[in-house]
């Protein structure tokens, strides 16, 4: 076998194929790892890993040990590691990190729980904004993100912060323009944090469309949901806010959407939420699920056939797992 193209050196994991072992084509590697072909090739050029080998016929492929290693690397990325840092580690350090991941079942991976201590103090953030302006606020938020994982930052940081900001505005302690600056800063930091995941991983089903119904202009809830869905390697299509119901249905059909996800803020009237949900449900095929979440009172105790109410961001993982289980897909 020609091994002129060999994987990067590794002191503890044998990445070369065993005698007679078939090599996996890149399409199979993509399916098994969730890492896209373009990502794998970009890593090969930039980091010299993963390097395929050639079989007797000269066809490039990947040994099983290398594919298993890529699965663990993907899990490390989902846990908050960055590709540049991860793939630049010396082999022994990378081995140790991946060994720890392999010894930890996915089901026991840390999941943020609601009601934990807030990671971001609204008063400290407001003081930062007033003293240093929007740039200082973004820096403060980025430091908060650096202290924890992305999922915890969303669930235990951004979510309670958004509630506190809204309450501060209602109480007259936060000006309207300050609430807007807060929201813009949060969304900028969160979108920046999501970028490595969205560009470095190959998304899987379900395909979700995220938006709000007409007259619901609050979009932060959508972005928080998109962050949690991205960490589950879902394919997300965001339409932004205030999308007409016929357009939601049209977009769902055009993009082969599996789930339409909607967010409702506390200020959205219950008298408008229920009719909108009923009409949208009627416009969508029965196979397309509707998931709703947010702080709107109308969602409390809501029971509408074909609509799943998510009581909090941490329920997104369960909803995705249920969908994949029902669809017969393996959840890695």
Image: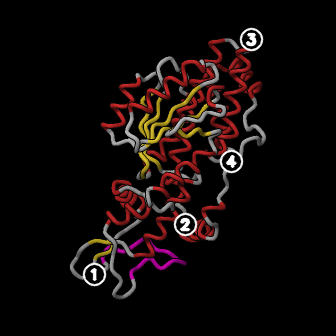
Q: Nearer the viewer, residue 330 or 179?
A: 330
Q: Quadrant of residue 55?
A: bottom left
Residue 166 vs residue 24, the one in the foreground: 166
Q: CA distance from mark 4 to mark 2?
A: 31 Å
Q: Which residues are magenta?
A: 4-17
Q: Residue 219: image x %, image y %?
A: 53, 26
Q: Is residue 29 above or below residue 149?
A: below
Does the segment drawn in magenta span residue 231?
A: no
Q: Which residue is label 4 attached to? A: 112
Please report the residue visible at 70 percent of the width from the left and 17 percent of the height from the top. Answer: 130
Local crowd at mark 1 within 10 Å, few (<14), some, or many (≥20)?
Answer: few
Q: Say which of 206 and 233 sits in front.
A: 206
The earlier-in-sequence mark between 1 and 4 is 1
The majority secondary structure of the magenta stretch comes to loop
Observer-side mark, 3 or 2, equals 3
Taking the image as shown, residue 214 lies to the left or right of residue 38, namely right
Q: Are marks 4 and 3 in contact (CB under 8 Å)?
A: no
Give the foreground label among 4 and 2. Answer: 4
- The image quadrant of residue 315 is top right
């Amino acid at each position: 076998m020609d091994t002129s193209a060999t994987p990067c050196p590794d002191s503890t994991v044998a990445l070369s194929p065993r005698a007679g072992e078939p090599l996996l084509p890149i399409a199979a590697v993509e399916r098994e790892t969730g890492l896209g072909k373009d990502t794998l090739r970009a890593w090969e050029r930039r980091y010299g890993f993963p390097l395929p080998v050639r079989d007797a016929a000269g066809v490039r492929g990947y040994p099983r040990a290398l594919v298993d290693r890529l699965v663990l690397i993907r899990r490390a990325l989902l846990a908050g590691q960055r590709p540049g840092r991860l793939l630049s580690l010396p082999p022994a350090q990378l081995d140790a990190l991946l060994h720890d991941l392999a010894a930890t079942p996915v089901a026991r991976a840390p999941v943020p729980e609601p009601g934990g201590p807030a990671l971001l103090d609204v008063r400290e953030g407001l003081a930062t904004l007033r003293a240093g302006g929007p740039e200082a606020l973004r820096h403060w938020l980025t430091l908060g993100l650096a202290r924890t994982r992305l999922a915890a930052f969303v669930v235990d940081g951004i979510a309670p912060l958004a509630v506190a900001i809204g309450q501060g505005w209602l109480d007259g302690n936060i000006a309207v323009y300050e609430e807007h600056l807060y929201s813009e800063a949060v969304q900028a930091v969160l979108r920046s944090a999501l970028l490595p995941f969205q560009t470095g991983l190959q998304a899987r089903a379900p395909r979700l469309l995220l938006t709000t119904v007409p007259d619901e202009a609050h979009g932060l809830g959508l972005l928080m949901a998109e962050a949690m869905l991205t960490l589950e390697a879902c394919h997300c299509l965001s339409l932004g806010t205030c999308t007409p119901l016929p357009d939601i249905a049209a977009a769902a059909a055009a993009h082969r959407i599996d789930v339409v996800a909607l967010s409702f803020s506390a200020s959205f009237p219950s008298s408008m939420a229920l009719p909108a949900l009923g009409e949208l449900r009627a416009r969508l095929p029965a196979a397309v699920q509707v998931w709703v979440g947010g702080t709107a009172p109308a969602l409390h105790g809501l029971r509408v056939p074909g609509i799943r109410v998510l009581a909090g961001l941490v329920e997104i993982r369960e909803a995705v797992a249920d969908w994949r289980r029902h669809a017969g897909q393996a959840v890695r």
